[in-house]
Image: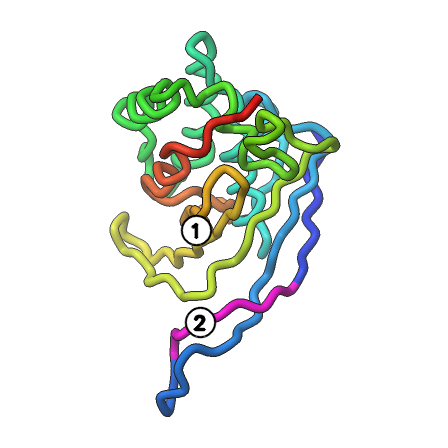
Amino acid sequence: MSQPRIELTPVTRQSSDGNVGNEGVRNVEVHQAKILFDSVPANVEELKQIDRSGENGKYLTMALVFSAFRAWTPETQDTCNDMLAYLMNSPTCGMVFNNFGKQFVKDRMTQNNKYPYLGNAYFDGASPANGYVPSEPMSATVEEYVYNMPPSTMYGPTLNLERVMTKFQGADSPRYMDFYVDPKDNQWYAWSDSYKGLLVDMKAPMV
């Protein structure tokens, strides 16, 4: 399993955070990240070969959550669950993806029979019009959030949360997840249950 590549592009978005002098909404520059895969990991052993440390690891980790969703079928639930647990259960926070999380994923994947296309929907080129078939070679484009997130001390040490957005053709509004660097291994992890917002319904495929 080769390390995915990350291409960063500055984009301008609007923010009202941190205003002074009643300046109102202002333009801010954030990073848009394109994660390019030679091959998308399909199980936890392949995930373990990927380094999620470094400044851009939050973007990569979100794309790897997408890859975990692709692995879910009624027959391969454990494959997806093992991948999500690896991306969420950190040395500091422990087991945050547990049996309740597994049941939540199952309920949402089977709701309106989304599992055949939900994972692919978050990759570039996938759309309702083409049955959510991603472009090849596969990539995912995500974006830095314009607002700062408050840190959390829920698990003891102060963990600085970073929010990452995804805009995709399956929904009219962006969706997001939160991430943090675990101080014990310097890898990025998905925060708590922020993955749940990615599992809500999306536009049905047209083919």
What is the x, y in percent for residue 20?
38, 88
Residue stretch in magenta: 10-18
Residue drawn where x is 59% and y is 53% of the image: 56
> Is 13 one of the magenta-colored residues?
yes
Q: Which residue is mark 1?
A: 180
What is the x, y in percent for residue 26?
47, 78
Q: Residue 195 has which mark?
A: none
What is the x, y in percent for residue 162?
44, 56
Query: Is the residue 110 above or below the residue 139 in the image?
Result: above
Query: Is the residue 89 above or below the residue 110 in the image?
Result: below
Amino acid type, mark 1: Tyr
Looking at the image, tell me whether mark 1 or mark 2 is earlier in sequence order. Answer: 2
- Look at the magenta stretch and give its main secondary structure: strand
Q: Which picture quadrant has residue 113?
A: top left
What is the x, y in percent for residue 55?
58, 56
Label 1 vs label 2, nearer the camera = 2
Q: Which picture quadrant has residue 45?
A: top right
Residue drawn where x is 35% and y is 37% of the image: 196
Query: In which quadrant of the rendered image does the C terminus lie?
Result: top right
Query: In which quadrant of the rendered image does the N terminus lie?
Result: top right
Task: Kindly check if marks 1 and 2 are in contact, taking CB atoms under 8 A apart as contact.
Answer: no
The colour mode here is rainbow
The residue closer to the viewer here, 162 or 160, is 162
Q: Which residue is mark 2?
A: 15
Residue drawn where x is 32% and y is 39% of the image: 193
Query: Is the residue 25 above or below the residue 40 in the image?
Result: below
In this orientation, does residue 190 appear? yes
Determine whether the residue tagged by mark 2 lies in a helix, strand or loop.
Answer: strand
Amino acid type, mark 2: Ser
Q: CA distance from mark 1 to mark 2?
A: 22 Å
The answer to whether 176 appears left or right of 67 in the picture is left
